[in-house]
Image: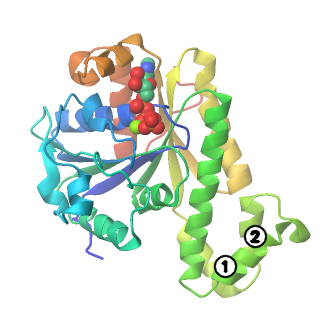
Amino acid sequence: MARVKKGCEIWAIGGGKGGTGKSFVTGNIGTYLASRGKRVILIDADIGGANLHTILGVSRPRTSLTDFFERKASLADLIVCCDSSNMGLVTGDLHSIDSGNIRYTQKLRLFRQIRTLETDYILIDLGSGSHANTVDAFLLADKMIIVLVPEITAIENMYHFMKNVLFKKLKISLGSRGFKEFLQDTWRNRTTYGIKNIKELIDYLRKHSTEVREVLDRELSGFRIYLIMNQIRHTSEISIGFSVRSVCMKYFGFKTHYVGYIEYEDLVWRCVNEQRPYLQSYPSSRCAKEIGRIAENLVEGRQIKMTYS
Ligand SMILES: Nc1ncnc2c1ncn2[C@@H]1O[C@H](COP(=O)(O)OP(=O)(O)OP(=O)(O)O)[C@@H](O)[C@H]1O
Ligand SMILES: [Mg+2]
C-alpha cells in the first residue's frame, strides 16, 4: 500500500448511532482547519446516506464516489471545491442503488487512493451503524473519532460500534499471524472461559503465548478513540464523556481521549436546512468556538480536563 504523504493525517468520524452530528462535525472541523491555512480533503463515505455536501452548502456536485465505483474514476479527479480554497470535497456515492455491497477489491482501491491524496488532513465522514465497510474505514484512520450525543440509545450504539471496531482490530492483528481461529474459538466459547467483555478477552488471549502477547501489545499500545460530545443541552451532560472514558478503559481496555463538546444550537439545523456552512455563517458563536477548540485538541492530541467549563 502506498505510504501516506509525510505530515498528512487521516481522521475518520463515526459513532454508531445516526443523526449524532458526524457530518456536521466533519464539515465544520474541516472548515476550521482550512481557515487556519491547512489543506483539507473531506470524503463523504456515508454509503447510502451521503449528505456532507449539503451541510457544506455545495449544491449538486458534478462528481461523486459513484464515479469512483462505477466509472473507475480516480479519487483525486473527484475532488470538488468548497468555499475555502484550502478545502476540497469528495461527495458520497449519490446515485448507486446497491451501494451497501461494495466489493472487497473496490474497497481496497478506495483505501489505497485515500492514502495517496496530496494534502494535510483527510477527514472521512462515515455513516451510522457497525457495517463492516464502516468499521474498516474507521480503522484505516490515524485518528478514530466518535461523535456522541447525550442519549441512552446513542451510548448503547456507540459501545456496540466500539466493540465491533476493537474485535475487527484483533481479527486483523491476530489473523495475519495465523491466530484467527484461536480468536474466533475463544470468543465463541467465552462463557466457558468466563470472559465477560473485550478486555477480559484480550487478557485471556495474551496468556496464550509470548507471540500472541507481543502482537497484541504492539498492535493495541497506540489504540485510542477520540470522543466528541455533541448537542449538549445542559452542563451536566458534559461529564458523560468522562464516564465513557472510564467505561472504555474498564471494559475494552483502551484509552479514550475526550477532546470536547458542542452545545445544542438552533442555528445549526437552520443552517443545514438553508444549506449554509455553519462556521462561515456564525464564526463568533459559542458552537464555532467549541468546534475550533476540538479541532485544536485533535491536532495536538490533547483532551479536556474534568474541571473544564
Ligand atoms: N450541535 C448541534 N446543535 C443543533 N443541532 C445539531 C447539532 N449537531 C447536529 N445537529 C442537527 O442534527 C442533524 C443531524 O446531523 P448530521 O447529519 O451531522 O448527523 P450524522 O451523524 O451525520 O447523521 P447520519 O448518521 O444520518 O449520517 C443535523 O441536520 C443538524 O440539524
Ligand atoms: Mg452523516
Q: Is 307 left, or right, of 42 in this rendering? A: right
Given residues 244 and 112, the one toward you in this image is 112
Q: Position of residue 84 (x, y in %)?
A: 13, 34
Q: Earlier in the sequence, mark 2 or mark 1?
A: 2
Classify 111 as above or below 149. Answer: below
Question: Foreground residue, 5 or 19?
Answer: 19
Q: Tell me the residue at 72%/60% (across/down).
A: 198
Contact check, label 2 and label 1, Cβ < 8 Å? no
- Residue 186 location in percent, x, y? 77, 75
In the rendered view, tell whether residue 111 sits above or below residue 241.
below
Q: Residue at x 64, y 36 (%)?
A: 155
The residue under the point 46% across, 59% down is 133
Q: What secondary structure is marked by label 2?
A: helix
- Label number found at residue 213: 1
Q: Residue furthest top?
A: 266
Q: Residue 189: where, in percent of width, then height?
A: 83, 72
Where 200 sits versus 123, above or below?
below
Quadrant placement of the N terminus: bottom left
Q: Amino acid at mark 2?
A: Trp
The residue singled out by tag 2 in the image is: 187
Relative height, residue 29 to residue 195 (above, below): above
| Front disc: 2 or 1 | 2
10 Å crowding of disc 2: few (<14), some (14-19), many (20+): some
Q: Does any portion of residue 206 appear in the rendered image?
A: no
Q: Secondary structure at mark 1?
A: helix
Report the amino acid beneath label 1. Arg
- Quadrant of ligand 2 in image: top left
Splitting the image into 4 quarters, where does residue 75 fall? Answer: bottom left
